[in-house]
Amino acid sequence: MNEVKRKQEILQVCAGQAQMADLEEDAIIRGVLLEIQVVRTLRDSGCEVIQMPVGEADLLIAKHMAEREKAYAVLSNDSDFCVFKNCCFIPHALFDIGGDLGLTQPLVLPKKPQRLMCGVVSSQGVQQMLQFSDADMIVELGIIAGNDFTSHCLRGLAGRAGVRNTRSLMSSAEWIRQYKRVDNCDVVRQEMARNRTLASAVEYSRTFYAAIQPGEGERDKSAYIYTLISDRIRTGEYPATFLPMYRCFYWQRSLLDDTQLCPPTEEMLAPLRAYLYGIILPRHKSGVTEWGQTHHQDLTQKTNNAVDDRNLPAINHIRDNQIFKNLKTFHYIMTHLEYGPVPEKTWFDKYGRKTGFICYVLRYFLLLNWGQCLDVTEPEFVALAAVALGASKESAWQEMPVCPDPRCVSIAAVFQDIYRHAFSFLGTVLHLTHEFPLPREIFSGSMWTILYALSGSVGSAARMFPLSSYDQLAYIPGERLHWAEIERDAILHDKRHVIRTLVDGVFYFDDRRY
């Protein structure tokens, strides 16, 4: 399903205009901070996470599968893993066939199984089933049936070449048993001679599924910054998005924000990315072409010019042991929205590294959305500050079933995307992420939904939908709401001095009730 369509359908459920049961199974938008938290959790658990600056993930996984003696199978739904020679995979539907892990049961953690039964699909098994004399014939089958590289340029070629039923895998396999290689057929060979795109796709398919890594193209000793970024992506120091940025390309992230309430979040944060481009791009590159999609599914592109500022260090001049200098640069960039002169005393000086980072994200959100964009209200911002500054037990908030309305998810999307820019972009390029809190320490979706709903009792912004989050509070037991208010007020009382400083010059925070 197209991501734009997914987003529209989810927002309709959030607005009370559709039922959750009506959503397609794959109607989900990837969490803004999901990969940051998952990757860090995996690494902290001792799992190996491999990043590559270029190339296909399938190829890398297949190579590791072949090279590692203890590797048994790839857990994936991608049938490509039965095309690579001597590779095998376990489709999700065939993992734990007997249900011994209890994955579908309402358990906090999976059960420790006495056995684990899985269905394995191997390239050898597929070869035998299709009666192929050579494993390479599986690659040829993918070429004529249409794989990731050839499907867009076949245009009915299989039918013209004599495949009896182009929608039948077995019919295509019968054709491959006759010709062995696709270019042994005169019709295909003549088309490849005429159509260089097809010929290139055929050769690339054969190289790719032979597990040969294509060259990186631009990488050479003279491209120092390119090499530096590529190497640090491999070591996990930089996110993979830095390389396309260096190549002047950025694909705007799909977020669950309602563009009828505010401009697209990624467009709102373009000025913040412009500072990053000023650090990453070499002198002869002035900006990055940013691509996105409208709610009509049309592609859009805009040039985001890099900030030309002598206060910004070049990426190759940033040192990981110059913490204080890098913190100063972070402060300089994250305060570019301030109304007056940049404050000399940083949030780090006031509240330490972790709380200081949270303050930068909250302050940036406030200045970006006060009287513009989301036009955030005082109660909404105070509720958001309580979530970001207060640690609370997630499961207790999840017990209160309130569906977030479109404004609720939009505020969450903007806040989290600011975090992503500050942590994953600025934090990594300045070697500061070890000083900053992880997503699980700064945001809870269930806690935010409840506190946002409670903030709606004093404002009308949350009542613009058929069934707002505030309206749903009527279905929550009074003692649970009372507990939520006590938790919120305790956080606000404890952090009242921080919040008062956060909103300085924007609105008056009356902390007497807390």
Image: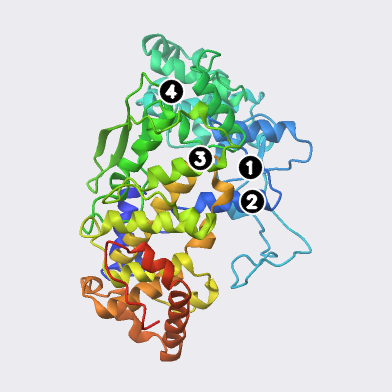
Q: Is residue 1 above or below residue 116?
A: above
**Discs 3, 4 touching: Cβ within 8 Å:** no
The C terminus, quarter of image: bottom left
Tell me the amino acid under the disc marked 3: Asn
The answer to whether residue 297 is visible is: yes
**Discs 1, 2 touching: Cβ within 8 Å:** yes
Please, which colouring scheme is shown? rainbow
Tell me the amino acid under the disc marked 2: Leu
Q: Residues within 10 Å of mark 4 (few under 14, many from 20)?
A: some
Q: Which mark is residue 213?
A: none
Q: Earlier in the sequence, mark 4 or mark 1?
A: 1
- Residue 379 picture location, percent across and down: 31, 73
| Residue 471 placement, left or right of 333 | left
Q: Earlier in the sequence, mark 3 or mark 1?
A: 1
| Residue 476 placement, left or right of 109 | left
Residue nearest the viewer, comparing 510 with 17: 510
| Residue 423 placement, left or right of 363 | right
Q: Residue furthest front?
A: 344
In this view, the mark in front (3 or 2): 3
Q: Residues within 10 Å of mark 1 (few under 14, many from 20)?
A: few
Residue underneath mark 3: 326
Tell me the amino acid under the disc marked 4: Gly
Residue underneath mark 4: 162
Residue underneath mark 1: 49
Q: Earlier in the sequence, mark 3 or mark 4?
A: 4
Residue underneath mark 2: 42
* Mark 4 to mark 2 CA distance (whole Å): 49 Å
Name the residue: 32% across, 33% down.
307
